[in-house]
Amino acid sequence: MSYARWSASSSVYVFHHVDGYITCCGCLLVNPDPINAKARDPELYSRSAAIEHLERHLAAGHRVPSAVFTRLRAEIEELSDTAQLGRRRVSKHKERKRRLFKWLRRPRRLKSPRLKSWEHYLKWSRINAWKKITDYTGDPS
């Protein structure tokens, strides 16, 4: 369920992400040029962080409905600041991200035992690619 959607009275789109955080989709603070956006949307792991983020939108002159603030403050009083955002607990989400990045940073095996490192592999692959481009020994006709 979203807190605010883009409309004539709102220039933000804030909602609960299924991974357990509140996100500001297409955030104009992070990506001032939304067409050529390269940065990720902010992941807010507490309702108070979402309120602070939306207050920065107001300070920047963006339109934010006042109902968003009242709903977030009511949820803080009713539940808590970080009570099970979305479907998963925040700690489970962080643990999954940590395991993913650990897996991505694992040592990789090189394709050839003669190569000493990845830099060495990349250097020789570029040289071999250049040899393929500039090899005019054969006549294609």
Image (cartoon, grey):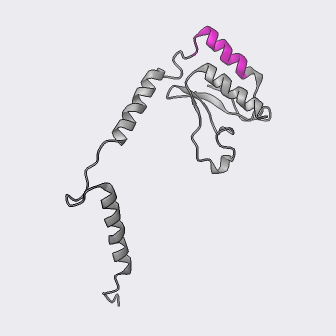
Quadrant hosting residue 16? top right
Residue 15 drawn at (x, y percent):
62, 28
Residue 33 visible, this orientation? yes
Kindly report the secondary structure that dominates the magenta region of the rendered protein. Answer: helix
Q: Is residue 95 left or right of residue 40?
A: left
120 vs 140, nearest the viewer = 120
Q: Residue at x 34, y 57 (%)?
A: 119
Whether 71 is among the magenta residues is: yes
The quadrant of the picture occupied by the N terminus is top right
Q: Residue at x 37, y 80 (%)?
A: 134
Whether 73 is among the magenta residues is: yes
138 vs 67, nearest the viewer = 138
Residue 92 drawn at (x, y percent):
42, 23
74 over 65 or under it: above or below: above
83 vs 38, nearest the viewer = 38
The quadrant of the picture occupied by the C terminus is bottom left
Quadrant hosting residue 102? top left
Residue 88 visible, this orientation? no
67 over 138 or under it: above or below: above
Q: How many numbered marks have been drawn onto this rendered protein structure?
A: 0
Q: Which residues are magenta?
A: 68-81
Q: Residue at x 62, y 47 (%)?
A: 37
Residue at far left of view: 113
Residue at far top of view: 78
Residue 123 drawn at (x, y percent):
34, 64
Residue 100 drawn at (x, y percent):
38, 36
